[in-house]
Image (tube, helix red, strand yellow):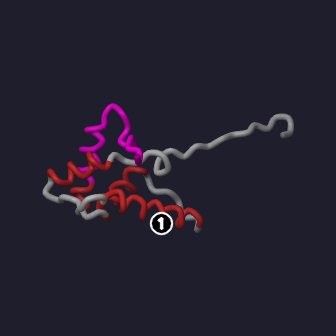
Amino acid sequence: MSRGERRYLLLDAGGTLVYPHSAHIEEACRQRGRALAPNAFLGAFFRAIHQLDEALRRGVGLTPPEDFVTSVIAAAGADLDTAKHALAAAKAACAPASLWTFALP
């Protein structure tokens, strides 16, 4: 390492170590009459992360995290209005902590 250079370590936690809290999202969808199939959110999330990785390799820019999660909720089986509501309700349920607090066993 030459003088003036610094080494950095970047840890990507979101979507790698922690995920949006699916139980809160699923409950909010259920309360709106749009129950998601078991594990539908997590399945849609992992498919979306894979698609996002592929898009980034092609040089496509990132979408805002809220838009990303809303689209995942919709892909899991909710209509867009329910997905937006579910995201807001899940964030409120997790407050003051982050929605991104779920870790796989």
Q: Is residue 39 left or right of residue 64?
A: left
Which of 10 and 64 lies nearest the eye of the viewer?
10
Q: Is residue 92 above or below residue 60?
A: above
**Residue extending farthest top:** 96
Q: Name the element at disc 1.
A: helix
Question: Where's residue 28, x and y in %?
Answer: 21, 49
The residue at 33%/56% (across/down) is 70
Residue 91 included in the magenta stretch of the image: yes
The residue at 27%/38% (across/down) is 92
Question: Where's residue 8, x and y in %?
Answer: 69, 40
Instruction: Count all numbered tags in the image, as a single digit.
Output: 1
Q: Is residue 103 above or below residue 72?
A: above
Question: Where's residue 29, x and y in %?
Answer: 20, 54
Q: Is residue 94 left or right of residue 30?
A: right
**Amino acid type for the residue under numbered disc 1:** Gln
Q: Is residue 16 above or below residue 80?
A: above
- Quarter in which the N terminus is drawn: top right
Q: Quadrant of residue 30?
A: bottom left
The residue at 32%/58% (across/down) is 41
Q: Is residue 28 above or below residue 5?
A: below
Residue topped by disc 1: 51
Q: Is residue 61 left or right of residue 45?
A: right
**Magenta-tinted stretch:** 84-105
Residue 38 included in the magenta stretch of the image: no
Question: Where's residue 63, x and y in %?
Answer: 45, 56
**Residue extending farthest right:** 2
Crowding around mark 1 (Cα neighbors within 10 Å: few <14, some 14 to 19, many 20+) is few
The residue at 50%/44% (across/down) is 13
